[in-house]
Amino acid sequence: MRRVRRRRAGGAAVSGLRPERVLVAGQAAGPVLFTTEPLSFWGGLDPQSGLIIDQRHPLVGQSVTGKVFVFPYGRGSSSSSGILLEAIRLGTAPAAIINWRVDGILALGILVGREMYGRTLPLLTLDPADFATLGSVSFLTIRPDGSFN
């Protein structure tokens, strides 16, 4: 297996990237957890541990807690907002979520978490080409306006 070096944010990989949309504003920083596979939080994420538990997902067993979770879009159930809400309550949620397709279900979970628990996380979309560049980034800082540092 070949080792791949991942660049830190601020390098050429994220220079000039801007979100297509900022669905939920906020700032965050953390290691990037990147996948090109969609994920349903309902049955795919354990909110108690923050672990991906979907046995068919390539990131099974990995933790989203405190990470900038980059995946194309949420798959499946509208109950995903409840799972994300519970992860926010328990402190096991990602630091931020970046998708290439707008996901209103995840936005709902984040907004309810902000109202109920005073906790939030940024939710951004990037166009697919910009999204793909984040696969080579190991750490990302998101400013309140959605830009990257």
Image (tube, rainbow, N blue to C red):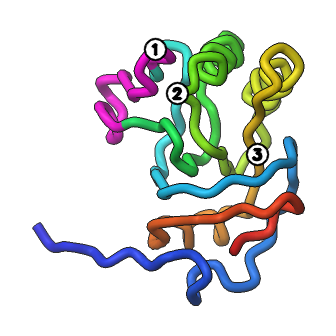
**Residue extending farthest front:** 118
Q: In which quarter of the image is the C terminus?
A: bottom right
Q: Which of 76 and 5 is in front in this view?
A: 5
Residue assigned mark 2: 92
Q: Distance between the residues labelled 2 and 3?
A: 15 Å
The tag earlier along the polypeptide, 2 or 3, is 2
Contact flag, marks 3 and 1 (Cβ < 8 Å): no
**Label 2 secondary element:** loop
Q: Is residue 129 found inside the magenta-colored segment of the image?
A: no
Looking at marks 1 and 2 on the same chain, the residue that comes earlier in the sequence is marked by: 1
Q: Quadrant of residue 108?
A: top right
Q: Position of residue 77 (x, y in %)?
A: 64, 14
- Marking on residue 127: none
Quadrant location of the N terminus in the rendered image: bottom left
For this view, does 18 lie left or right of residue 8?
right
Residue underneath mark 3: 122
Image point 58% across, 89% down: which residue? 12
Three-letter amino acid code of the residue under disc 2: Thr
Please name the residue shown 89% across and 19% down the image: 115
Q: Which amino acid does label 3 sit on?
A: Pro
Question: Mark number for residue 48?
Answer: 1
Residue interval drawn in magenta: 46-62
